[in-house]
Amino acid sequence: MKSYLISIAFLLFSEAVQAQVVHSGSMSEMGKSNFKAAIFLDSLPSRNNLFGIGPYGRMQGEITLLKGKPYISVVQADGTATVSQNWKAEAPFFVYANVVRWKSYALTTQIENINDLQRAIEELATQNGYDLSTPFPFRISGTFTELTTHVVTPRSADIAGYKPGRNQENYSLSKAKGDLLGFYSQQHQGIYTHKDSYIHVHFVNTKRTVMGHVDKIAVAKSKLIVMFPSK
């Protein structure tokens, strides 16, 4: 009986650790080190249930870790962005969590911008007993009426893909089917969320051929599936 209780306690402890949000580097500080790597993806343990987001390399693209798969979006010479998978990647800042189980909730609120999305996440999380003072990842699946995303590009001429006066390439998407992966925190503005927001969100389409950082979003009042780590 004692060993059984110890096993249960260990399982609960393991799940709590796995759902913990971890970050390396800082959004507001990375430029001071010329975007030097703060983390190498292939150094992360227990990759099967990893979820994470951040810029790729020395601002050479975007990284989204989704269900243990690392999607990397890079802008090509013609301005299009291509998505590949590769664990041999580094990031000047990165936020991630190891989540074994997710719990799904329906969201029918109309969303017109990023602030609306943040409020919807806060309301749904609060209604279902999540503590907003503790950082957490979230996922949203469905069809998004309008999205504007970006993929960052190099800031320095010594990095392949650099173009003077361009720091990112922007993309407009309509009726885009796929997944949002985001991280919510009230304590990490300027670290892994922008200074005017509590969320940082990436989009990956259903075919896993389009991926980028979400700047603008609009969703008609239709059903989306929101997922939070299972408590």
Image: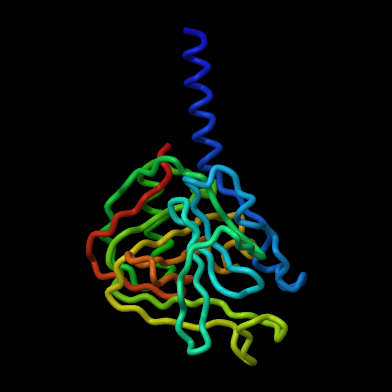
Q: Residue furthest bottom?
A: 164
Q: Residue furthest left?
A: 222
Q: Nearer the viewer, residue 187 or 47?
A: 47
Q: Residue furthest right?
A: 33
Residue 194: name its quadrant. Answer: bottom right
Residue 78 position within the rendered picture, expressed as x and y whole percent measured from the top left: 48, 89
Q: Nearer the viewer, residue 217 or 80?
A: 80
Q: Please name the residue shown 50% across and 49% down the image.
A: 50
Q: Is residue 118 left or right of residue 87?
A: left
Q: Please name the residue shown 33% across and 66% down the image.
A: 207
Above-or-below relation of 12 to 93: above
Total labels: the figure holds 0
Above-or-below relation of 28 to 13: below
Residue 30 position within the rendered picture, expressed as x and y whole percent measured from the top left: 70, 68
Q: Please name the residue shown 32% across and 64% down the image.
A: 206
Is residue 92 at all visible to an observer of this figure?
A: yes
Residue 99 position within the rendered picture, expressed as x and y whole percent measured from the top left: 47, 44
Residue 118: name its quadrant. Answer: bottom left
Is residue 133 at all visible to an observer of this figure?
A: no
Describe the colour scheme in one phrase. Answer: rainbow
**Viewport quadrant of the C terminus:** top left
Residue 67 position within the rendered picture, expressed as x and y whole percent measured from the top left: 43, 51
Q: Please name the residue shown 66% across and 56% down the image.
A: 24
